[in-house]
Amino acid sequence: MKKGIMRVIKGIGIAVVGIPLLLIALFIVCEVFGAVVNHAATGKQTKEIRNMISEEIDDAQIIDVQSETGNSSGTGNHVDCLTRISFTSGKDEETIAGILDKGYEFFDLRSENDIYTVTIITGAPFRDNIEGH
Protein backbone atom coordinates (compact mmCIF):
# COMPACT_ATOMS: atom_id res chain seq x y z
CA MET A 1 0.00 0.00 0.00
CA LYS A 2 2.79 2.38 0.95
CA LYS A 3 4.68 1.56 -2.28
CA GLY A 4 1.57 2.39 -4.34
CA ILE A 5 1.18 5.81 -2.68
CA MET A 6 4.88 6.54 -3.22
CA ARG A 7 4.55 5.65 -6.92
CA VAL A 8 1.62 8.04 -7.30
CA ILE A 9 3.47 10.85 -5.50
CA LYS A 10 6.56 10.19 -7.63
CA GLY A 11 4.45 10.27 -10.82
CA ILE A 12 2.82 13.55 -9.78
CA GLY A 13 6.25 15.04 -9.00
CA ILE A 14 7.60 14.01 -12.41
CA ALA A 15 4.53 15.49 -14.11
CA VAL A 16 4.80 18.77 -12.14
CA VAL A 17 8.43 19.17 -13.21
CA GLY A 18 8.21 17.52 -16.64
CA ILE A 19 5.20 19.32 -18.15
CA PRO A 20 6.61 22.86 -17.74
CA LEU A 21 9.99 21.70 -19.07
CA LEU A 22 8.27 20.11 -22.07
CA LEU A 23 6.29 23.30 -22.74
CA ILE A 24 9.45 25.44 -22.50
CA ALA A 25 11.27 23.11 -24.91
CA LEU A 26 8.31 23.25 -27.32
CA PHE A 27 8.34 27.06 -27.18
CA ILE A 28 12.08 27.16 -27.94
CA VAL A 29 11.70 24.75 -30.86
CA CYS A 30 8.86 26.87 -32.30
CA GLU A 31 10.92 30.06 -32.02
CA VAL A 32 13.96 28.47 -33.69
CA PHE A 33 11.75 27.02 -36.45
CA GLY A 34 10.16 30.45 -36.99
CA ALA A 35 13.58 32.13 -37.20
CA VAL A 36 14.79 29.59 -39.77
CA VAL A 37 11.65 30.06 -41.89
CA ASN A 38 11.91 33.87 -41.65
CA HIS A 39 15.53 33.84 -42.81
CA ALA A 40 14.64 31.50 -45.67
CA ALA A 41 11.84 33.88 -46.70
CA THR A 42 14.27 36.82 -46.72
CA GLY A 43 16.71 34.83 -48.86
CA LYS A 44 13.94 33.88 -51.29
CA GLN A 45 12.75 37.50 -51.51
CA THR A 46 16.29 38.75 -52.16
CA LYS A 47 16.88 36.13 -54.85
CA GLU A 48 13.56 36.96 -56.58
CA ILE A 49 14.24 40.71 -56.59
CA ARG A 50 17.80 40.22 -57.81
CA ASN A 51 16.56 38.00 -60.64
CA MET A 52 13.79 40.46 -61.51
CA ILE A 53 16.28 43.34 -61.74
CA SER A 54 18.64 41.27 -63.88
CA GLU A 55 15.89 40.03 -66.21
CA GLU A 56 13.62 43.08 -66.48
CA ILE A 57 16.27 45.83 -66.61
CA ASP A 58 18.47 44.66 -69.46
CA ASP A 59 21.42 46.98 -68.76
CA ALA A 60 21.43 46.59 -64.97
CA GLN A 61 24.75 45.97 -63.27
CA ILE A 62 24.23 44.86 -59.67
CA ILE A 63 26.75 46.47 -57.33
CA ASP A 64 25.65 45.39 -53.85
CA VAL A 65 23.04 43.09 -52.31
CA GLN A 66 22.04 43.26 -48.64
CA SER A 67 19.37 41.38 -46.78
CA GLU A 68 18.28 41.41 -43.18
CA THR A 69 15.68 39.63 -41.10
CA GLY A 70 14.40 41.32 -37.97
CA ASN A 71 12.63 44.41 -36.72
CA SER A 72 13.48 47.04 -39.32
CA SER A 73 11.53 49.93 -37.83
CA GLY A 74 12.83 49.79 -34.27
CA THR A 75 9.33 50.06 -32.87
CA GLY A 76 6.82 47.35 -32.21
CA ASN A 77 7.30 43.64 -31.85
CA HIS A 78 7.35 42.20 -35.35
CA VAL A 79 9.77 40.68 -37.85
CA ASP A 80 10.41 42.06 -41.34
CA CYS A 81 12.24 40.77 -44.39
CA LEU A 82 14.42 43.59 -45.74
CA THR A 83 16.21 43.51 -49.08
CA ARG A 84 18.38 46.33 -50.41
CA ILE A 85 20.00 46.10 -53.86
CA SER A 86 22.19 48.75 -55.48
CA PHE A 87 22.67 48.70 -59.25
CA THR A 88 23.50 50.89 -62.21
CA SER A 89 21.36 51.37 -65.28
CA GLY A 90 21.03 53.80 -68.15
CA LYS A 91 17.25 53.88 -67.74
CA ASP A 92 15.53 56.78 -66.01
CA GLU A 93 14.05 56.51 -62.53
CA GLU A 94 10.43 56.47 -63.73
CA THR A 95 11.06 53.49 -66.02
CA ILE A 96 12.83 51.56 -63.28
CA ALA A 97 10.07 52.39 -60.78
CA GLY A 98 7.49 51.11 -63.27
CA ILE A 99 9.37 47.84 -63.68
CA LEU A 100 9.78 47.33 -59.93
CA ASP A 101 6.15 48.26 -59.26
CA LYS A 102 5.03 45.21 -61.24
CA GLY A 103 6.62 42.83 -58.76
CA TYR A 104 6.31 44.39 -55.32
CA GLU A 105 3.87 46.77 -53.69
CA PHE A 106 6.13 48.37 -51.11
CA PHE A 107 9.52 49.58 -52.19
CA ASP A 108 11.72 52.61 -51.92
CA LEU A 109 13.80 53.61 -54.92
CA ARG A 110 16.61 56.13 -54.59
CA SER A 111 19.02 57.39 -57.19
CA GLU A 112 22.40 58.96 -56.56
CA ASN A 113 25.22 59.41 -59.10
CA ASP A 114 23.58 56.98 -61.59
CA ILE A 115 23.38 54.30 -58.90
CA TYR A 116 19.90 53.09 -58.00
CA THR A 117 19.14 51.57 -54.63
CA VAL A 118 15.89 49.68 -54.18
CA THR A 119 14.73 48.75 -50.69
CA ILE A 120 11.90 46.30 -50.14
CA ILE A 121 10.46 45.48 -46.73
CA THR A 122 7.82 42.79 -46.35
CA GLY A 123 6.37 41.05 -43.32
CA ALA A 124 8.00 37.77 -42.34
CA PRO A 125 5.94 34.56 -42.26
CA PHE A 126 6.37 34.35 -38.46
CA ARG A 127 5.93 38.04 -37.63
CA ASP A 128 5.73 37.52 -33.86
CA ASN A 129 9.04 35.67 -33.64
CA ILE A 130 11.62 36.44 -30.96
CA GLU A 131 13.80 38.22 -33.56
CA GLY A 132 11.33 41.09 -33.61
CA HIS A 133 11.67 41.95 -29.93
Image: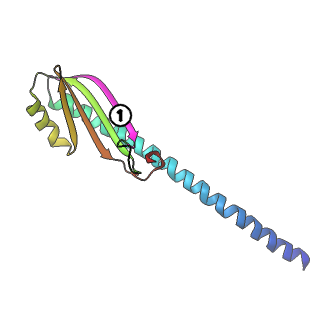
Residue at (39%, 40%) from the top-left corner?
69
Residue drawn at (17%, 37%), measured in percent from left and top?
Answer: 100
State how the image is colored. rainbow
Q: Amino acid at mark 1?
A: Ser
**Viewer-closest of 112 and 46:** 112
Q: Which residue is mark 1?
A: 67
Instruction: Return the x and y of residue 48 as percentages of the image width and height.
Output: 27, 37
Magenta stretch containing residue 59, yes or no?
Answer: yes
Query: What are the residue bounds of the magenta stretch?
Result: 58-71
Q: Residue at x 31, y 36 (%)?
A: 83
User: Where is residue 45 shown, x and y percent of the image?
Assistant: 31, 39
Residue situated furthest bottom in the rendering: 1
Q: Secondary structure at mark 1?
A: strand
Q: Residue furthest front?
A: 75
Please provide percent x and percent y for residue 91.
Answer: 9, 25
Q: Residue at x 41, y 45 (%)?
A: 38
Q: Give yes or no for residue 18 being in the magenta stretch.
A: no
Q: Which quadrant: the N terminus? A: bottom right
Q: Is residue 87 above or below residue 71?
A: above
Characterize the local packing of mark 1: few (<14), some (14-19) or many (20 or more) Cα atoms within 10 angstroms.
Answer: some
On screen, 117 above or below 20?
Answer: above
Where, by quadrant of the figure, is residue 87 drawn? Answer: top left
Q: Is residue 23 left or right of residue 36?
A: right
Magenta region, main secondary structure: strand
